[in-house]
Amino acid sequence: KQEVTQIPAALSVPEGENLVLNCSFTDSAIYNLQWFRQDPGKGLTSLLLIQSSQREQTSGRLNASLDKSSGRSTLYIAASQPGDSATYLCAAVNQAGTALIFGKGTTLSVSS
Amino acid sequence: NAGVTQTPKFQVLKTGQSMTLQCAQDMNHNSMYWYRQDPGMGLRLIYYSASEGTTDKGEVPNGYNVSRLNKREFSLRLESAAPSQTSVYFCASTYSLGAQGEQYFGPGTRLTVT
């Protein structure tokens, strides 16, 4: 059974710092991996989707990488801002493409 | 485009009562999903509909039923609510015939069962 783990559960950084959020998954046979952002009391917003054949995807200050062989993905946030404060979730799509398996998220706090 | 909409936003039920959570999307998406989010448990899939006319169980389907009314609408029904069903419920949709596409989420329904 696929399990997705995110470490750390919470992270506090000063504004301007570059940071990395980690995601690991137990079954490397994934269809793709997706990163989401969730603000308090809100739904999830898709940030990046990495296909299983890709190594990384970039959107603005965000860069996500995927290493299927080691079962790991990272989300790199450059020059963090207070507006980046949120919970970040990663989710692996199983190889059959039928379901997203979510990690429990990393709650990021960026102080000004 | 409104995206994915959910009603109601908040609901309080007594144990044993029934209710239906409504979800609609206006993006012509094929697949729709119901998740629940609980502290310490993360998001878990309840039911999904990979295309109009089909529904399948997810990880935690017990106590729930679903209806894919048409391509736009996917409802979740609690027949006899229990305190263990206190949670935040999210509906999501994607254009792909399956979960592999980018998923769009609704704002959630916060349900309390007393």
Image (cartoon, coloured by chain):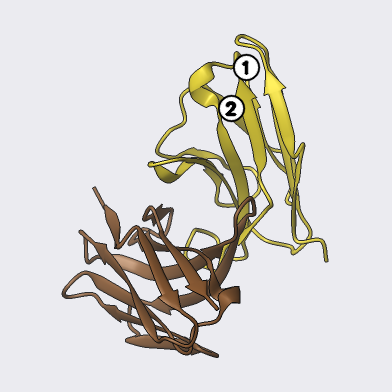
Chain colours: A brown, B yellow
Q: Residue at x 45, y 66 (%)?
A: A108
Residue lying at the far top of the rendered structure: B16
Residue B109 location, quadrant: top right
Residue lying at the far front of the rendered structure: A112
The three-letter amino acid code for the residue at tag 1 is Glu
Q: Residue at x 65, y 36 (%)?
A: B110
Compared to B95, does B35 lie above or below? above
Instruction: Give the CA distance from mark 2 to mark 1.
Output: 8 Å
Q: Is residue A86 left or right of residue A5?
A: right
Q: Nearer the viewer, residue A21 or B43?
A: A21
Upstream in the sequence, badge 2 or badge 1?
A: 2
Residue B31 seen in this snapshot? no
Q: Which residue is mark 2?
A: B65
Q: Residue at x 73, y 51 (%)?
A: B71
Q: Is residue A35 left or right of residue A42?
A: left
Where is residue B33 drawn, in percent x and y?
57, 48
Give the label on residue B79, or none: 1
Q: Are marks 2 and 1 in contact (CB under 8 Å)?
A: yes
Residue A4 seen in this snapshot? yes
Say which element carries label 2.
strand
For mark 2, name the chain.
Answer: B
Q: How many marks?
A: 2
Discs 2/1, front: 1
Compared to A32, does A87 lie above or below? above
Give the label on residue A110, or none: none
